[in-house]
């Protein structure tokens, strides 16, 4: 028994390619394009055909990421701020603790700590 192979056939949407491309440039979805094809152009094909055709035509630019490289000791990121209200142990008082995090760019090591009380609040 030999496997059956099918030759690819042209999509029923091919005659409407220009209209579909124009609608995709307007960022319209496949449902709206299908409805317009049926109402305005007398399209008799299925919605899934329009959806598959539109997905093939959509041009997606890949996200670009720039890799940053640093030498040891060249750069460090410092984050400083206040945390959520917490109760001071042994009292009924509440306060916002100050937070400090330093991250070295080369090794990605972080140092956390409690800044001195004289440190100004951000």
Image: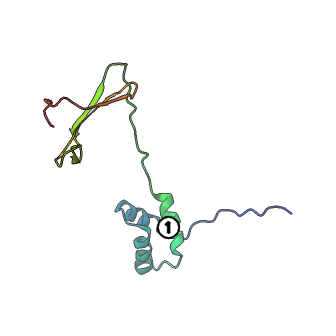
Residue at 40% from the left image edge and 62% from the top image edge:
24
| Horizontal side of residue 32 vs 117, given as left or right | right
On-image quarter of the C terminus: top left
Residue plotted at (23% across, 47% down): 84
Name the residue: 53% across, 65% down: 52
SS for dot 1: helix
Left/right of residue 5 with respect to residue 92 in the rendered view: right
Image location of residue 9, percent across then percent down: 63, 65
Q: Nearer the viewer, residue 70 or 122?
A: 122
Q: Residue at x 40, y 38 (%)?
A: 65
Residue closer to the observer: 98 or 24: 98
Is residue 122 rendered to the left or right of residue 105?
A: left
> Where residue 15 sits: x, y (%)?
50, 69
- Classify 109 as above or below 37: above
Q: Which x, y percent locates residue 83?
A: 23, 43
Task: Note whether 58 is above or below 91 in the view shown.
Answer: below
In the image, residue 34 above or below residue 87: below
Q: Which residue is mark 1?
A: 51
Instruction: Count residues near mark 1 (Cα–Cα under 10 Å), then give few for <14, some for 14-19, many for 20+.
Output: some
Residue 19 vs 65, above or below: the answer is below
Q: Position of residue 39 (x, y in %)?
A: 41, 80
């Amino acid at each position: 028994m030999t496997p059956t192979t099918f030759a690819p056939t042209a999509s029923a949407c091919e005659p409407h390619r220009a209209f579909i491309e124009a609608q995709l440039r307007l960022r319209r979805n496949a449902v709206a394009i299908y409805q317009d094809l049926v109402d305005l152009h007398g399209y008799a094909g299925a919605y899934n055909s329009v959806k598959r055709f539109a997905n093939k035509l959509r041009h997606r630019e890949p996200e670009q990421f720039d890799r940053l490289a640093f030498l040891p000791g060249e750069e460090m990121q410092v984050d400083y701020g206040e945390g959520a209200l917490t109760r001071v142990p042994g009292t009924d008082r509440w306060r916002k603790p100050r937070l400090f995090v330093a991250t070295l760019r080369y090794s990605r090591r972080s140092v956390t700590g409690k800044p001195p009380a004289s440190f100004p609040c951000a």
